[in-house]
Image: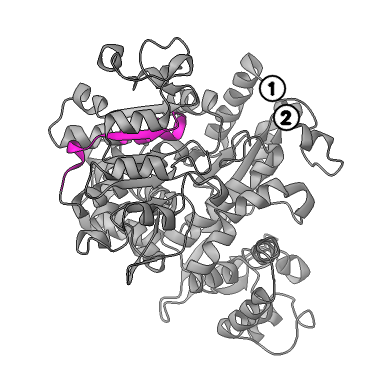
């Protein structure tokens, strides 16, 4: 592992890094490499003379050249490959380019393009990034963790690749998700990239197409299940605690049969959270709080139908119930306002096929006995919407087009400002298109989507479509946890994050504005979220108390900016 510190010149305020590498090896280290921007002094000191073109470029010159090359790529896949190659070559320039063109490039490094890239991972693979911990090498997990390139790891994102977005089991290709998520930590909250570590746990795949692919890079074996799987996860968590005891562990894109139980098992053992459950719940809650405020009502007054009852949906339910209780409802009353619909129809407590997390939010059968439950397969979404008359409709089931014109028009008959969130990713899996939702509701719908969509032009006005993107939540949560020194990540931290984000909604001052702030200001948003999370961690006694001023100082000290520091050769022991 490479360990390095960023110092500051007392006279100039310039950042200085003592690097343990020189010559060609330095040019191969993306965290230090400046490319053509190495100064004359650095070239002489670090053994770079003759290895670079003679002109010393500014970063602005590099940005012009790099963006020009980016624009010449004609497909999303080519642009994704170009950006990841830049990340593997020069991380500072990579993040500066993204920050200059965040609206354009965020979809390229994360949803929706990361889904395509994950599907094609073994075919577009260029260079390794992160750690690949395969089941056959389970006895060497700690050794693999100690092979991480940098020592000061503070944030780990891990997946087993079984439920990548709405695309299912992608095996080793799931690595695209931790890489993308950690890029967003650095881009949006300023977490230094050298302190992040993406990991894929390769326990095999049940995707036969991958197993039959001669270029597949993962372990060619069906997925490990049961006690063997659980033992492997236990070995991994214990090794993380030994090697990186101060790191946040973020669980990402685990299948529903594992996501909730792994979170519940380890949340009090290690500083960890599941972004699919808690992050999705928090960003959705933020959108709902802003939407209901824009509509002139309260969340506790709504009837909510959610299509999909997996881990994301239950995370949304938990956050909604918490917020409704803070508005005065009891827990039972809050749960009664939520109606889940899964692949077998309405979720009620007379069904004998419910997992524990679904049963928690099942409607009492006595309440729905007189409903049209649609026969043996249960009530369809259309039946539920017709009978419940929801004010809010949320999709997390990855069923493209599930919010049909009939369903939406039925909903719109009973509420002045229908709140509709088709949240499934990627774009092809969205339950509805915003342009259709606006047309079917005569422009009255308040819409947020899981993937990016263009603005809708309706009756002479432009309706901005907000992306209900976890990027507004998890980077700030991570920053706040690190700054506060929180020992655990509780649900209360996510509620605090949701409220901080909701307070920044443009829709609170303009009912037809976007629900979420512009991406151009994401660093400011993440900072506000981090301060709220850190303060809540201290209030909940998950972290040692400090003054608000000290907490603010800690947050600001952690926010890295993509600017080249001055490099100098580290002293070597004689």
Reply above or below: 455 against 409: below
Please provide the residue range marked out in magenta. Answer: 297-319
Q: Distance between the residues labelled 2 and 1?
A: 6 Å
Image mark for residue 224: 1
Q: Is residue 293 left or right of residue 203?
A: left
Are dots 2 and 1 in contact, CB under 8 Å? Answer: yes
Q: Quadrant of residue 559?
A: bottom left
Q: Nearer the viewer, residue 343 or 140?
A: 343
Point out residue 238 in the picture as x, y percentages from the top left corner: 56, 27
Q: Residue furthest left?
A: 328
Q: Which residue is drawn at 61% across and 52% down?
A: 114
Q: Quadrant of residue 354?
A: top left
Number of labelled discs?
2
Q: Residue 542 vs residue 60: left or right? A: left
Q: Residues within 10 Å of mark 1 (few under 14, many from 20)?
A: some
Task: Please name whichever residue, 529 or 317, is drawn nearer the observer in this view of the structure.
Answer: 317
Q: Above or below — where is 421 with respect to 224? A: below
**Picture coordinates of residue 265, whole percent (x, y):** 46, 22
Q: Does the magenta stretch include residue 307?
A: yes
Q: Where is residue 44 in the image (x, y as percent from the top left)?
A: 70, 82
- Residue hosting label 2: 204
Q: Residue 358, how many percent across, how many down? A: 41, 21
Q: Quadrant of the C terminus?
A: bottom right
| Vertical arrangement, residue 485 with respect to residue 67, above or below | above
* Residue 503 belongs to magenta span: no
Query: Which residue ends up furthest to the right in the rendered image?
Result: 214
Secondary structure beneath dot 2 equals: loop
What secondary structure is marked by label 1?
loop
Is residue 272 visible in this depiction of the protein? no
Q: Quadrant of residue 175?
A: top right
Check disc 2: other Cα within 10 Å, few if <14, some if 14-19, many if 20+: many
Residue found 56% across the figure and 84% down from its top: 60
């Amino acid at each position: 592992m490479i360990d390095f510190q960023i110092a500051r010149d007392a006279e100039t305020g310039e950042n200085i890094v003592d690097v343990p590498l020189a010559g060609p090896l330095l040019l191969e280290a993306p965290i230090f490499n400046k490319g053509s921007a190495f100064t004359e002094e650095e070239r002489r000191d670090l053994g770079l003379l003759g290895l670079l073109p003679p002109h010393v470029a500014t970063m602005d010159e590099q940005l012009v050249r790099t963006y020009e090359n980016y624009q010449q790529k004609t497909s999303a896949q080519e642009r994704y490959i170009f950006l990841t190659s830049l990340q593997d070559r020069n991380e500072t320039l990579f993040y500066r380019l993204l920050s200059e063109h965040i609206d354009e490039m965020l979809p390229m490094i994360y949803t929706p393009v990361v889904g395509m890239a994950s599907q094609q991972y073994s075919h577009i693979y260029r260079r390794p990034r992160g750690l690949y911990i395969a089941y056959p090498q389970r006895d060497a997990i700690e050794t693999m963790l100690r092979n991480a390139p940098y020592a000061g790891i503070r944030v780990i994102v891990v997946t087993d690749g079984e439920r990548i977005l709405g695309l299912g089991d992608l095996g080793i290709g799931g690595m695209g998700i931790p890489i993308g998520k950690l890029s967003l930590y650095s881009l949006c909250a300023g977490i230094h990239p050298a302190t992040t570590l993406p990991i894929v746990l390769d326990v095999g795949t049940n995707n036969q197409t991958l197993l039959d692919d001669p270029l597949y890079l993962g372990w060619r074996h069906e997925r490990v299940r049961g006690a063997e799987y659980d033992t492997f996860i236990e070995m991994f968590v214990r090794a993380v605690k030994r090697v990186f005891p101060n790191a946040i562990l973020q669980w990402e894109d685990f299948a529903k049969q594992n996501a909730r139980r792994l979170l519940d098992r380890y949340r009090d053992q290690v500083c960890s959270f599941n972004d699919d459950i808690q992050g999705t719940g928090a960003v959705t809650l933020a959108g709902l709080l802003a939407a209901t405020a824009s509509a002139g009502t309260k969340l506790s007054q709504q009837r909510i139908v959610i299509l999909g009852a997996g881990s994301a949906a239950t995370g949304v339910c938990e956050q909604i119930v918490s917020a409704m209780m803070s508005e005065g409802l009891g827990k039972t009353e809050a749960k009664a306002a939520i109606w889940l619909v899964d692949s077998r129809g309405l979720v009620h407590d007379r069904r004998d096929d419910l997992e524990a997390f679904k049963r928690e939010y099942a409607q009492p059968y006595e309440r729905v006995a007189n409903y049209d439950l649609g026969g043996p397969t249960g009530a369809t979404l259309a039946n539920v919407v017709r009978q419940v008359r929801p004010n809010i409709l949320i999709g997390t089931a990855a069923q493209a087009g599930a919010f049909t014109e009939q369903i939406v028009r039925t909903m719109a008959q009973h509420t002045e400002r229908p709140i509709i969130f088709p949240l499934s990713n990627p774009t092809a899996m969205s339950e509805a298109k915003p342009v259709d939702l606006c047309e079917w509701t005569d422009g009255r719908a308040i819409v947020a989507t899981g993937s990016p969509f263009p603005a809708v032009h309706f009756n002479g006005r432009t309706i901005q479509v907000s992306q209900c993107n976890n990027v507004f939540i998890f980077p700030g949560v991570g920053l706040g946890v690190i700054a506060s020194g929180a020992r655990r990540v509780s649900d209360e931290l996510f509620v605090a994050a949701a409220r901080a984000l909701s307070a920044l909604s443009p829709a609170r001052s303009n009912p037809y504005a976007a629900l979420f702030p512009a991406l151009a200001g994401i660093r400011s948003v993440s900072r506000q979220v981090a301060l709220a999370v850190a303060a809540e961690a201290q209030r909940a006694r998950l972290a040692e108390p400090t003054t608000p001023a000290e907490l603010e100082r800690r947050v600001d000290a952690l926010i890295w900016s993509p600017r080249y520091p001055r490099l100098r050769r580290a002293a070597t022991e004689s």
